[in-house]
Image: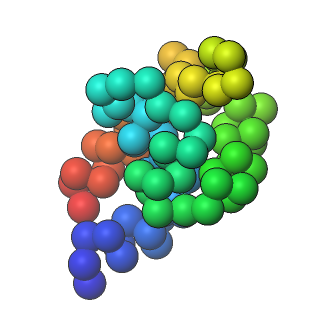
Amino acid sequence: MGKKKVFGIFFREKPAMMLVTLLNKTHEIYASSLAKTVDCTYSHVVKILQEMNKAGLITFEKQGRLKVLTLTSKGEEVAKHINNIKNLL
C-alpha cells in the first residue's frame, strides 16, 4: 500500500493537505490558489476553509477583493503534527 493511501486511511486527504500547504507556504495563499495546489474544486475548498475557520485553525485577512489565508497558532500546531505523520508514513 502506498504512502498516500495509508495517509488517507487516517486523515481526509484534501483538508490535511490544505493545512500542510498553508504550513509550508512561501507566499500569500488564497482559496483559489489552494484549490489548484490540492487539486480540489474552489467551492469544496471554501467549505472546508469555513469549517477550519470555525475550529480556530485559520484566519481570513481581506486584501481588496481577495482573502489571504493564514494559520493560527493552533492551526500551525495541527499542521505540523499532520506533516510529521505524513513524513513517518
Up-down relation of residue 8 to residue 33 (above or below)? below
Write the residue at 67% across / 41% down: 49
* Residue 37: percent from left, percent from top: 41, 52
- Where is the N terminus found, in terms of image quarters? bottom left
Query: Is 55 drawn above or below residue 18 in the view shown?
Result: above
Quarter of the rendering occupied by the C terminus: bottom left
Colour pattern = rainbow
Find the residue positioned furthest to the bottom.
1
Whether residue 79 is visible, yes or no, is no
Say above or below: 37 vs 76: below
Q: How many labels were placed on the picture?
A: 0
Q: Is residue 81 visible?
A: yes
Residue 60: image quadrant is top right
Q: Residue at x 61, y 62 (%)?
A: 41
As drawn, which residue projects farthest toward the front? 64
Q: Of 1 and 68, which appears nearest the observer?
A: 68
Look at 53% across and 52% down and name the residue there: 35
Q: Nearer the viewer, residue 32 or 40?
A: 32
Residue 80 place in picture, x, y as percent: 36, 34
Q: Is residue 47 left or right of residue 11?
A: right
> Residue at the location (33% across, 44% down)?
83
* Vertical arrangement, residue 70 with respect to residue 37, above or below: above
Q: Position of residue 6 (x, y in %)?
A: 35, 72
Q: Is residue 78 left or right of residue 65?
A: left
**Where does the image place residue 12, in percent across and percent down from the top left?**
54, 62
